[in-house]
Image (cartoon, rainbow, N blue to C red):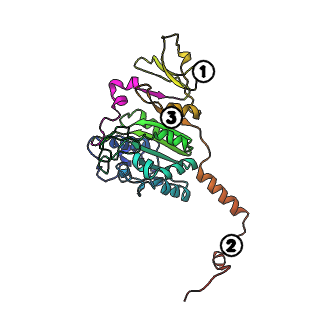
Amino acid sequence: MNVEAPLKPADYASDQEVRWCPGCGDYAILKSVQRTCADLALPREKTVFISGIGCSSRFPYYMSTYGFHTIHGRAPAIATGVKLTNPELDVWLITGDGDGLSIGGNHLLHVLRRNVDMQILLFNNEIYGLTKGQASPTSRVGTKSPSTPAGSVDAPLNPVLFALGAGARFAARSIDTNQKHLPVMLRRAHDNKGASFLEIYQNCIVYNDGVFSNFTEKDVAADTQVELEHGKPALFGKDKKKGLRIKPGKIELEVVTIGQNGVTEADILVHDETNKSLAALLAAMEPPEFPKAIGVIYCDPAPSYEVAVHKQIAEIAAKTPATDLNKLLRRGQTWTVN
C-alpha cells in the first residue's frame, strides 16, 4: 500500500519566478501562506487563490494550486462566484489597500456582509506600489506622493474598522515579518467558516519604506504593539507591565501601568473577541498614544452565505415538480427568427 508523503511548504510553490522587488514584504507573506497550507495539509486541487490588480495580486502565480489573477477590485465578486459554484473549494482572496479599498471597496463590502466562506488577505502598505507610489485609501495625512505632492489631506481608511462596519464576523491583524504570529493568524482565519478578514501590514521597500517602523521595529515593538488573545489580559511592554483598561465611567480605552496609581493586573482589560464594540475600540488604536492591536480583534461566527444559498436551492427543488427545460424555454410568448 502506497502512502503519499505529507506535502511540504515547497510543494505549494509554483515553478514561476517570484518577481517582487528585493526586500518586499510580500515574500514573507508568501512564505507564511505556503507554510500554513502545508501545516493544514490543504489539497492543492481543492485550493484556489484569487486576486485583483496590484503587487499583492501576483500571488496566484506563485502558488501550486488553482488560481485566478482577475481585474481591478473585482476579485471578491469572482471569488464569491467560485465558492457558490463549488462550495467544496477552499477559496483565498488576495488583495491590497488600493485594490480592495478603492475601486474594490464596494465588492469587498458585500463579500464581508454576505459572510462568504473564504480567507481575505489584505496586504496594507499604505501606498499604490504597482503604479509607482501614489497615495492609497490607507495613506496617512501628509503622505507625499506623485498624486499628493504637497501631502495628502485625505483622512485614511482603517481596514479593520471598514470590515467591522461591513458586517465581518472575523477580523484580525498581523505583520509581514512576524513569522511566528502571521501563520497563527492564517490558521485562525482558515478555521473560521465564513468571511475571514486578515489585514497584514506589509512594507513597500521602494515607495513607502519604513512607514510602519514606529511599531514594527524590534527596539520599539514590545512597547508599541499589543498582541490580543481571547480570554487573556491585554498586556504589553518589555516587562508586560503596561496594559489597556476601560476608563472608569467611560466607554474609552486608556493605557495604564501595573504598580502605578494603584493599578493591578485585575484592572487590565481581558480581551473578548466576541465583543464587537470592544473590537472597534481596539482596531482604532494608533501609536504613539496607544499600541497597535494585532491578533484576532473580532470573531463571532455565523452561518456562511453559500451554505444558506444551497440550502434554499435544495428546499425549492424538493417541492418543485421536475420541469422539461425545453418546454420551459418555449412557453409563453415566443417567436422564430428567420
Residue range of the region highlighted in magenta in the rendering: 206-229
Q: Is residue 184 above or below residue 131?
A: above
Q: CA distance from mark 1 to mark 3?
A: 26 Å
Determine whether, in the image, residue 115 is placed left or right of residue 202: right
For the point 35% across and 29% down, the residue is 214
For badge 2, the amino acid type reads Thr
For badge 1, the amino acid type reads Gly
Q: Is residue 24 above or below residue 73?
A: above
Which residue is tagged 2?
323
**Is 219 in the magenta?**
yes
Q: Is residue 316 above or below residue 94?
A: below
Could you say which disc has been placed on residue 239 in the image?
Answer: none
Which residue is tagged 3?
296
For badge 3, the amino acid type reads Val
- First in sequence: mark 1 vs mark 3: 1
SS for callout 1: loop
Q: CA distance from mark 2 to mark 1?
A: 65 Å
> How many residues crowd around disc 1 within 10 Å: few (fewer than 14), some, or many (20 or more)?
few
SS for callout 2: loop
Image coordinates for residue 253, horizontal then vertical, percent: 52, 25
Evaluate whether residue 53 shows in this view. Answer: yes
Which residue is tagged 1?
249
